[in-house]
Image (cartoon, helix red, strand yellow):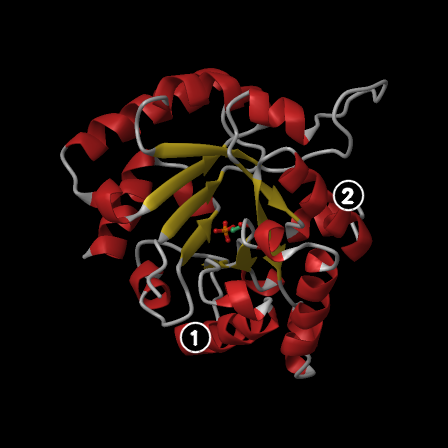
């Protein structure tokens, strides 16, 4: 089974609308002279405010746009909320769900994450489901147990067709924004464990990303692992030139 590699950029709470559009323009210019997009799917997840203008800017290219979060429901009296339906209409094709920052700062638990995965699928968005262990859990040798619980809960109740739309991102919490990373072999072992937890008829086709302090220095080591199909990148995705370098390292 060949899975198409995916490089996903998570901009978090960075970049104004103007900066997002300028980045889109620069990335298109750089990709014109690169073979990168023939071999790698590139996904940019800006703030919700920049979704529509960025999606407009990259329309007609192979660059995909996604959201970083969605709220439940579709339309309604829900002050401040942004649903999957509205994100989709604004140009998103993917949405990050269950990022550890959402779990930590917005108190999203496994049950909420599961509802958001379902809401994303209903809105015709592909969820990028983030799972990962704390440093303490890793020290206690509980990584696979913790991730198993997160994955099983998020996929519960999904049929095979729905589950086949999910991309999984393995992001050890202690590696996010810290410069510390697991060895690529370690990350691959967890990715293999995740694949075993997927419904058997879709396991082979599911894309599993590694995330946490990915940079041009290490992306190749992760992306060439047998069960890792790309990366979810935060800090190092904020410069178009650095993202471009990572795309090229993935295909080289
Ligand atoms: P980082 O973030 O690449 O800055 O570590 C990754 C993420 O949070 O998705």
Residue 139 lies, in percent from the top left, at 65, 81
**Above-or-below relation of 50 to 219:** above
First-in-chain label (1 vs 2) = 2
Asked whether residue 16 appears in the rendered view, the answer is no
Q: Nearer the viewer, residue 221 or 199?
A: 199
> Which quadrant of the view contains residue 43?
top left
Residue at coordinates 51% horizontally, 18% vertically from top-left?
A: 52
Would the CB of label 1 be found within 8 Å of ligand 1? no
Residue 154 lies, in percent from the top left, at 70, 57
Residue 74 lies, in percent from the top left, at 74, 26
Q: Nearer the viewer, residue 224 or 141?
A: 224
Tell me the quadrant of the picture where the C terminus can be found.
bottom left
Asked whether residue 239 appears in the rendered view, the answer is yes
User: From this viewpoint, which residue is outermost toward the left?
Assistant: 33
**Above-or-below relation of 67 to 109:** above
Q: Say few, some or many: other residues with alpha carbon within 10 Å of mark 2 (under 14 / 14 to 19 / 20 or more).
A: few
Residue at coordinates 70% horizontally, 83% vertically from top-left?
A: 140
Going by the image, does 44 lie left or right of 111? left
Tell me the quadrant of the picture where the N terminus can be found.
bottom left
Mark 2 sits on what residue? 106
Mark-to-mark CA distance, 1 and 2: 29 Å
Disc 2, SS:
loop
**Above-or-below relation of 231 to 30:** below
Going by the image, does 32 lie left or right of 240? left
Disc 1, SS:
loop
Q: Nearer the viewer, residue 39 or 137?
A: 39
Residue at coordinates 66% horizontally, 83% vertically from top-left?
A: 141
Q: Say few, some or many: other residues with alpha carbon within 10 Å of mark 1 (under 14 / 14 to 19 / 20 or more).
A: few
Residue at coordinates 30% horizontally, 27% vertically from top-left?
A: 61
Going by the image, does 65 lie left or right of 252? right
Mark 1 sits on what residue? 183
């Amino acid at each position: 089974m060949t899975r198409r590699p995916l490089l996903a950029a998570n901009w978090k709470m960075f970049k104004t609308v103007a900066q997002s559009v300028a980045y889109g323009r620069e990335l298109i210019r750089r990709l014109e002279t690169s073979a990168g997009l023939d071999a790698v799917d590139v996904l940019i997840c800006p703030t919700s405010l920049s979704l529509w203008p960025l999606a407009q800017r990259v329309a007609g290219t192979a660059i995909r746009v996604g959201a970083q979060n969605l709220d439940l429901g579709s339309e309604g009296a829900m002050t401040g909320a942004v649903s999957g339906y509205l994100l989709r209409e604004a140009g998103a094709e993917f949405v990050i769900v269950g990022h550890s920052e959402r779990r930590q700062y917005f108190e999203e638990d496994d049950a909420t994450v599961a509802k958001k995965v379902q809401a994303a699928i209903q809105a015709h968005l592909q969820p990028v489901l983030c799972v990962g262990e704390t440093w303490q859990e890793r020290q206690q040798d509980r990584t696979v147990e913790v991730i198993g619980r997160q994955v099983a809960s998020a996929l519960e109740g999904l049929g095979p067709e729905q589950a086949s739309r999910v991309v999984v991102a393995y992001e050890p919490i202690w590696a996010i924004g810290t410069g510390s990373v697991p060895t690529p072999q370690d990350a691959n072992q967890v990715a293999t464990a995740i694949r075993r937890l997927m419904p058997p008829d879709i396991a082979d086709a599911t894309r599993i990303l590694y995330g946490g302090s990915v940079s041009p220095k290490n992306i190749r080591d992760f992306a060439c692992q047998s069960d890792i199909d790309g990366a979810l990148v935060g800090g190092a995705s904020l410069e178009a030139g650095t993202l471009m370098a990572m795309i090229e390292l993935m295909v080289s």
